[in-house]
Amino acid sequence: MANIYWTGPKAPEQEAIKALMTELVECTDNTFTVRKESDDSGNHLGVYVEKNNPNENVGFIWKKILPPKFMGWRVIIMFCPIGYIKGVLNAPTREWY
């Protein structure tokens, strides 16, 4: 029954990512990024937010709460350590020989 909530039309991928990035500026002061990802339940937008301390209360990070569905896309929020976005997610790719 839960899958009925996630059905319906979706905005184009790049349009939804751009709009969600704009929305996140109002939600947090921490570093963040958005990526299209997929899991066993299908495609979703992964929101990565850097967090100083793993034990830090999530309420201190959010100024505004994100909905679980944004422009038709399922949104999954993941907290990561400082430097993870730049050093891992957005790191340049290497040629392996």
Image (cartoon, grey):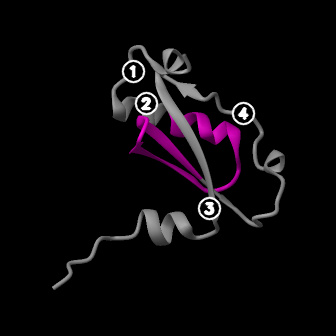
Q: CA distance from mark 3 to mark 1?
A: 27 Å
Q: Residue 57: percent from the left, percent from the top?
A: 84, 53
Magenta span has 38? yes
How crowded pointer 4 is (Cα within 10 Å; few <14, some 14-19, many 20+) is rated as few
**Badge 2 local density, few (<14 within 10 Å), some, or many (20+)?**
some
3D distance between C-alphas at marks 3 and 2: 22 Å
Q: Spatial distance from mark 4 to mark 2, Cα to Cα? A: 17 Å
- The residue singled out by tag 4 in the image is 65
Identify the image quadrant of residue 77. Answer: top right
Q: Which residue is mark 2?
A: 16
Cα separation, mark 3 vs mark 4, equals 18 Å
Which one is in front, 40 or 7?
Answer: 40
- Residue 80 is labelled as 3
Question: Label 1 amino acid?
Answer: Lys
For marks 2 and 1, give the CA distance: 8 Å
Q: Are marks 4 and 2 in contact (CB under 8 Å)?
A: no
- The kind of residue tagged 4 is Ile
Q: Is label 3 in a helix, a strand or a loop?
A: strand
Identify the image quadrant of the C terminus.
bottom left
